[in-house]
Image: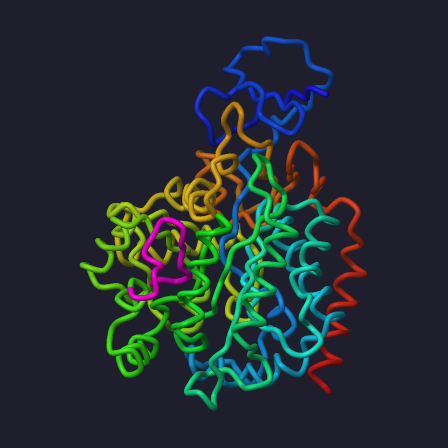
Amino acid sequence: MRLWLKSPMAILASGADGGLVVDQGRIAELVPRGGAPASPVDETLDLSRHVVLPGLINTHHHMYQTLTRANPAAINRELFDWLKALYPIWARVVTPESFRLSTRLALTELMMSGCTTAADHQYLFPTGLENALDIQAEEATALGIRMTLMRGSMNLSVKDGGLPPDSVVQDEDMILSDCERVIGRYHDLSDGAMLQVALAPCSPFSVTKSLMQASADLATRCNCRLHTHLAEALDEDDYCVSRFGCRPVDYLEEVGWMSDRAWLAHGVHFQPDEITRLGRAGVGVCHCPTSNMLLASGSCRTRDLEQAGAPLGLGVDGSSSNDGSNLMEEVRHALLLNRLTYGTNVTDRDVLRWATEGSARCLGRADIGAIAVGKQADLACFTLDDLRFSGAGDPIAALVLCGASRADRVMVAGTWKVVDGMPVGVDVERLRWEHGEAARRLIAD
């Protein structure tokens, strides 16, 4: 069926003021102002109340953490102390049932904010949660959202000089075996793929050098991407120097990760020469402004990384270091935080680009992230009906400057997944109650 999305109030695309035509899950045509589709359409939808963006793309999250939002044990702590407070709680409370609910809630919240592709860094595998990525694949498929399943890992526990407790780490052989299983089952390299897999050892302070190297080798062999936390906090710099005798970027190069196959979460504490090296290698960076502010980690050198050649995307990070899963709010926070470093040289279009085209580059996807002929029909449509938008002159800038947080319509692969602000086929009230009960019950235990 050919669908004409007609005459949007504004659209983040060139030559599409008259809207666009969707056919078989792709963008088939851009319609100029005052024009009409070149070929007959089966249905027309008037979008004159809507501002249309490419579907937003989240490149870093920890969905299980929705169970421990605003947890009293971790409030007002910086990264290492925050992790030490929460690791024992996560090891106790994350069960297959609670994990399923946490994934469903995070994906739903993301989608309602205009997100059409999500990447989740799942590195916590306590006993009983070995099939975590299978659960996430089921939940993403049921909702109809694209997802990069990041098979995370930790094999360096407290007894070995790492940060996580013994109960949440796994043996290297077990990790690599499951990585191969997950890749074989879910990694789809075709255009328009709904599920892909990335290998994601957690961080320098929770993973051995051997596992980092083995993960890079496996990713090359299976043609998948690599992801890890890097340079998030000064404590991490100190840890790398004391344990490995080098800074985090030097360590990254030592273990074979300095390539355009990799993208990093946070990237706050890079030195100028390190930014140059990362850009030259094409290593991507996911900027997580809300988390970096909440944990007082610092601010990513976004414009410097982009100018050096590094793909730059956005991520909401874990829902207990944010404490939300709203990518449109992350866009606004990215603008405000980066203005403190770069002044008004960072614009609303810059941060929207990071959340779309930049994030797509981080994930290695050329089929999403922009409104253009041949791209997947992934769209986020916002209205400006709320009081906060009254008087706004530039509709696209208004989404960022006035604080949009909820999409009115969201399309994934040509199918509406959010209509009138609500996810199709999801009982939000029931989900809220079940998830809340799971969090209260498990934390009480």
Residue sitting at x 81%, y 61%: 430
427 lies above or below 2: below
Q: Nearer the viewer, residue 445 or 225?
A: 225
Which image quarter is the N terminus in? top right
User: Residue 436 appears at what percent x and percent y?
Assistant: 73, 71
Query: Which residue is at the far left?
Result: 273
Residue 424 on the magenta segment:
no
73 lies above or below 113: below
Where is residue 348, by image quadrant? Answer: top left
Which image quarter is the C terminus in? bottom right
Q: Is residue 24 left or right of residue 402?
A: right
Where is residue 51, by image quadrant? Answer: top right
The image's colouring method is rainbow
194 lies above or below 272: above
Q: Nearer the viewer, residue 100 or 319?
A: 100
Where is residue 205, by image quadrant? Answer: bottom left
Q: Nearer the viewer, residue 343 or 19?
A: 19
What is the tally of numbered marks visible in this picture? 0
Magenta span of residues: 254-267
Residue 255 on the magenta segment:
yes
User: Residue 65 appears at what percent x and percent y?
Assistant: 60, 70
User: Residue 351 appears at what percent x and percent y?
Assistant: 40, 46
Residue sitting at x 61%, y 64%: 178
Q: Is residue 5 left or right of residue 297?
A: right
User: Residue 290 appears at what percent x and percent y?
Assistant: 45, 63
Q: Is residue 239 left or right of residue 155?
A: left
